[in-house]
Amino acid sequence: MLPVTIIIWPECPYCTRVLRYIEELKLEYTHFAHIPITILDESRDFNSLRTFHYFLVPCIYVDKKKLFEGPVSRQDVFTALTSALQISNVIVP
């Protein structure tokens, strides 16, 4: 499985929504629970964010490749998590 990185801003309602979508999808699709997900807070993780190129939050990367930036839907989050599995040659049931 490839790592997923999500860049957020704590006060951003879209970021809060993305985190909620992740938790819902992990419960609904148990194979997502094993994906390594790193949440980077734009207000705290300055040094970690230097390697990422983005303008909007939330921003979702799979293995350092940007997939989504800005307001995202539940389907977008599902697609990102599925990509983390498929890219690493794990077949999603």
Image (tube, helix red, strand yellow):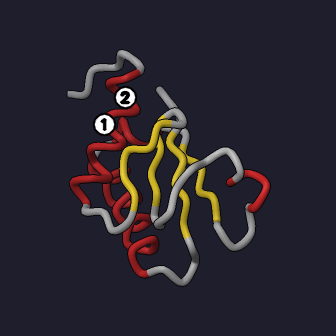
Q: Which residue is mark 1?
A: 82
The residue lying at 52 percent from left, 56 percent from top is: 54
User: Which amino acid type is shown beneath numbered disc 1?
Assistant: Thr
Q: Are marks 2 and 1 in contact (CB under 8 Å)?
A: yes
Residue 91 is situated, as x and y percent measured from the top left of the image, at 27, 20
The residue lying at 39 percent from left, 74 percent from top is: 14
Residue 61 is situated, as x and y percent measured from the top left of the image, at 47, 44
Q: Which residue is mark 2?
A: 85
Of residue 24 and residue 53, the one placed in the foreground of this image is: 53
Quadrant position of the C terminus in the picture = top left
Mark 1 falls on what kind of element? helix
Q: CA distance from mark 2 to mark 1?
A: 5 Å
The disc placed on residue 61 is none
Q: Residue furthest right?
A: 47
Residue 73 is situated, as x and y percent measured from the top left of the image, at 25, 63
Q: Residues within 10 Å of mark 2 (few under 14, many from 20)?
A: many
Q: Residues within 10 Å of mark 1 (few under 14, many from 20)?
A: some
User: Which amino acid type is shown beneath numbered disc 2?
Assistant: Leu
Which picture quadrant has residue 74?
A: bottom left
Q: Is residue 56 above or below residue 64?
A: below
The residue lying at 33 percent from left, 60 percent from top is: 24
